Amino acid sequence: MARPKLLPDNFTLALVGTVIIASLLPCRGTVAVGFNWLTNFAIGLLFFLHGAKLSREAIVSGAMHWRLHLVVLLSTFAMFPLLGLALKPILTPLVTPQLYMGILFLCTLPSTVQSSIAFTSMAKGNVPAAVCSASASSLLGIFITPALVGLVVHSHGATTGSPWHTVGNITLQLLVPFIAGQALRPAIGKWIDRNRAMLKFVDQGSILLVVYVAFSEAVNEGIWHSMSLATLGGLLVVNIVLLALAIFATAFAAKRLGFSRADQITIIFCGSKKSLASGIPMAKVIFASQAVGAVVLPLMLFHQIQLMVCAVLAQRWGARRTAAEKAREPERAAAPVRR
């Protein structure tokens, strides 16, 4: 039996379970030091595999559609941070300063890759353009996100350190493994493509490990004693509003700029989503360890909301496109055959 669209997926349930375990059994002392070394290795492996999976041919084939990619990148790296800053008077009464810092961090992140492509395909959008746009967003985010964090988050009272120091850490821990994966793709690319199911386990396992360590540190610092149910409810409202504004803004811009229906779908799904897979490792590198738990909490919640909402939209738009195509079939059959 298929899982109902509005229920959380298995990975989201695993994330919730990891937070519960970290809340009840947080790692401390030498165990925490060992877990930190393990998470650093896992993050490097994660981005190495991302580099090995990314096809250069897909990027080249879709790169010519520059207007679409420009709209997606502006939505991801300009519109979202501006929304986060513009909504500050509304957001600050609803969430704590640390959670608002997490919302600003969420706004600086790149788009997702796998789910953006999957939803675009389900909704009958421009899949090759989605592959290129989402991949470019993920790659450019390695450079753009730490720079935006330095400008947006650091200027609002977050102790993230020097932006150049952050870029250096990102380069060593994320970009170098990514480039190594790209360099070795000719040798291991076919093996990577044949074993995507196993690599998905490494992908998700790395994120769960980082979440456990981050929330262990946050629990040791007393995160749940300083956060009420009303605050969590406020965070839920903030994420829903942020996603709704992003979807409406990308839909409006894509239509006004004259893109085709398929391209509009691609812009909406690639331009309104944020990457959990990139965001959690980046938070581990960018922020002090005691702040990571609160910083990634808005992202984890936004991740589930965007999956549920986009799944419903993709299913509805795909069904509408299929119905329209079936309605045109009698017209095609009745049309005279030209000789």
Image (tube, helix red, strand yellow):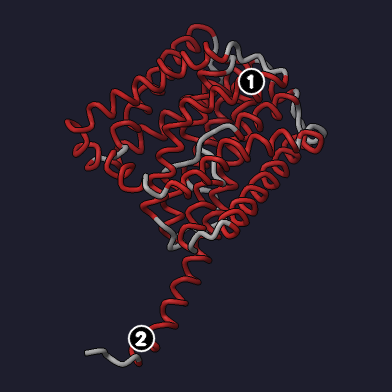
Q: Position of residue 321 (x, y in %)?
A: 46, 71
Give the secondary structure at mark 2: helix
> x, y (%) of residue 185?
23, 32
CA separation, marks 1 and 2?
A: 64 Å
- Of the 4 image quadrants, the one containing the C terminus is bottom left
Residue position marked by numbered label 1 in the rendering: 219
Residue at the far top in the pictured view: 30
Label whose residue precedes the other's in the sequence (1 or 2) = 1
Residue 338 as seen in the image, left or right of residue 74 = left
Which mark's residue is nearer the viewer, 1 or 2?
A: 2
Looking at the image, residue 44 lies above or below residue 161: below
Q: Is residue 202 above or below residue 9?
A: above
Name above or below for residue 302 compared with residue 279: below
The residue drawn where x is 57% and y is 46% is: 272
Q: Residue furthest left?
A: 187
Q: Which residue is mark 2?
A: 332
Label 1 neighbour load within 10 Å: few <14, some 14-19, many 20+: many
Q: Is residue 47 left or right of residue 123?
A: left
| In-front residue for pair 127/319 | 127
Point out the image quarter for the N terminus: bottom left
Q: Residues within 10 Å of mark 2 (few under 14, many from 20)?
A: few
Q: Which mark is residue 123?
A: none
Observer able to see residue 4 = no
Q: Amino acid at mark 2?
A: Arg
Q: Is residue 173 above or below residue 3?
A: above
Number of disc labels: 2
The residue located at (61%, 20%) in the rendering is 150
